[in-house]
Amino acid sequence: MTDSNALRLRVPEPSGRPGERTDFSYLRLESAGTVPRPKPDVPPLETADLAWRLIRVLDDDGNAVGPWDPKLTPKELVTGLRHMLVTRAFDSRMLMAQRQRKMSFYMQSLGEEAIGVAQAMALQPDDMCFPSYRQQNILIARGCPLSDMICQLLSNRCDRLMGRQLPVMYSRRDYGFFSISGNLATQFVQAVGWAMASAIKGDTRIASAWIGDGATAAADFQTALTFAQVYQAPVILNIVNNQWAISTFQSLAGGEEATFAARGTGSGIASLRADGNDFLAVYAVSQWAAERARRNLGPTLIEWVSYRAGPHSTSDDPSRYRPKDDWEHFPLGDPIERLKQHLIGLGVWSQTQHEHALEEAREAVLQAQQEAETHGTLANGQTAQPATMFEDVYEQMPWHLQQQLEQMEALR
């Protein structure tokens, strides 16, 4: 036998723990405007380089540079900023409401507002989104009434889902927002299947699916890539790499030595890696992917590099596994501040206007919350009626459920 070194197993560790300063060099950033923009009909193999680079439009001074600049009008930019402000105000109020025990659970999208808002604006209103649990910004950008969303969070008498879904797991077909699934990565296969059905019917609508970096380790992720590539489904597959899956750093899902976008390249899918905190980059890349899908050129996988600024949920304490000030040092910054800086640089926005818009957003959320709470909250016990557990399960209620319903009502 020949002498050899003992085998070792590498267990990835995050580049920063509580009490330390995170080293973000693993992100492999590059200057805005340096990544080329291919035509949407490019073969998937020719996007391989883009899966390792980072598409950026806004530079450090807030200027839009490079070939990916979508050339949006000031009105479109301001609309996007306002949607992002409402999203952040919504998250803040709902987090407070959960602490007041008016709802059982909540999940913020703090720091990720640009991703859902910009893509929602780049898609058609009737394209179907298969979201994860941080895409409330899609509903907000599409004009869903805030009071309806809050009723779902409160599980009250006007909750369209009758308290059957965990708060934040919205379902609004009329706003192109497919029912959220609590199981990780299931929305990827659902979106691919829906997109295939749309193509079979000769429809014009495309699908867009969302998962986080941790969910890429689920088997459904690979299944979705296989079906999307084989059948050239008209779908956009979004991976929000916000660096943390609850307390697990993204390197444990394989995102440090490689990129998540590179997994699409290996499956024969056009794949891009983009700055998720850059509203213009998100819009431009989403628009590129949507055009590709509509022209029957196949699926696109996009890795959005961002940062989860808050806890994973109201059940989480991120100070136990990462530095408390981590987001302040994240090199891609705050998406709202970056778009604000860009608008001010264009001369179409000011700090005064921004503060006024923020106050308007807070007031809109407050009014919606007050309206929703008139229908009940978890704190006052006015939630969905117990009898609703028997409804909408079967087209016609079978005898044994009817019997159980009568027994329950007799005990009340």
Image: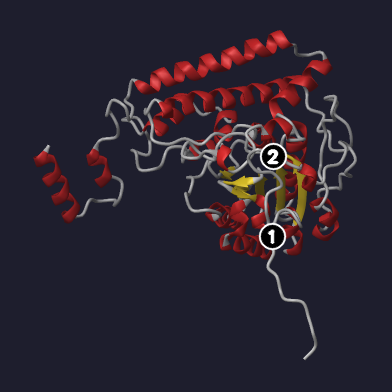
For marks 2 and 1 on the same chain, the one whose residue lies earlier in the sequence? 2
Q: Is residue 85 left or right of residue 283?
A: left
Report how far apart the C-alphas of labels 2 and 1 lie in the structure.
Answer: 45 Å
Any part of residue 408 in sight: yes
Identify the amino acid type marked 2. Glu
| Res 215 label | none
* The furthest residue to the left: 410
x then y, percent, for residue 386: 23, 39
Relative to 279, say whether 373 is above or below.
above
Which residue is painted at 36% across and 22% down in the image? 373
x then y, percent, for residue 231: 66, 63
Relative to 364, say whether 224 is above or below.
below
Residue 379: image quadrant is top left
Which residue is painted at 19% across and 52% down in the image? 401
Of residues 50 and 250, the one drawn nearer to the viewer in this rendering: 250
x then y, percent, for residue 142: 58, 31
Reading the image, the residue beneath label 2 is: 20
Identify the amino acid type marked 1. Gln
Residue 31: image quadrant is top right
The C terminus - image quarter: top left
Reading the image, the residue beneath label 1 is: 232
Q: Nearer the viewer, mark 2 or mark 1?
A: 2
Disc 1 secondary structure class: loop
> What count of labels does the image hold?
2
Q: Is residue 397 left or right of residue 321?
A: left
Which residue is painted at 62% across and 25% down in the image? 83
